Image (spheres, helix red, strand yellow):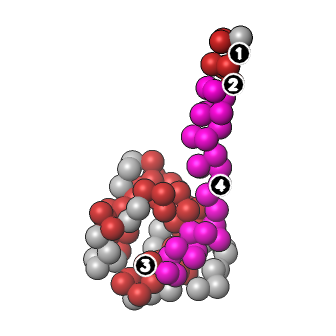
Amino acid sequence: MRKIAGIILTAILMTGFVSTVAFADVAKGQKLYQKKLKKPCGMTGAKFAAMHTQDEWEEIKESGKFKEEIHKICPKVKPESIKEKWIQHLYDFVYEYASDSGNVPSC
């Protein structure tokens, strides 16, 4: 009985960790950009996302330099002001609307 309870608890914990990434989405990233970054960046979300191609955004995120890249594009936004829980949503947004995607956001 103890073993089964341990397996169930482990499964629940793993689902919690995996679901954080699974619930990231483009619309939430767009809203975050509009609310938190648009004014200090001084540009639309379309222009911001089009600063790189999808491959470049992916490489930046995988290298762990996503916050630093936001700061480089928008010097008024300090890397420490960007919350970790925003990263996946913002990434999904910029990836979806990157310069080579052919998509244009409404912000």
For marks 1 and 3 on the same chain, the one whose residue lies earlier in the sequence:
1
> Which residue position holds label 1?
4
In this rendered view, identify the residue nearer to me: 61 or 99: 61
Q: Which SS class for mark 1?
A: helix
Please name the residue that numbered disc 2 is placed on: 8
Cα separation, mark 4 vs mark 2, equals: 22 Å
Residue 15, by quadrant, is top right
Q: What residue is shown with label 4?
A: 23
Classify 79 as above or below 32.
above
Q: CA distance from mark 3 to mark 4?
A: 21 Å
Q: Residues within 10 Å of mark 3 (few under 14, many from 20)?
A: many
Task: Kindly indicate whether the residue at mark 2 contacts the one at mark 1 (C-beta within 8 angstroms).
Answer: yes
Instruction: Pick whichever of labels 3 and 2 is earlier in the sequence.
Output: 2
Magenta extent: 9-35
Sequence-first tag of 1 and 4: 1
**Image x and y of residue 49, in percent:** 51, 73
Disc 3 residue type?
Answer: Leu
Q: CA distance from mark 1 to mark 4?
A: 28 Å
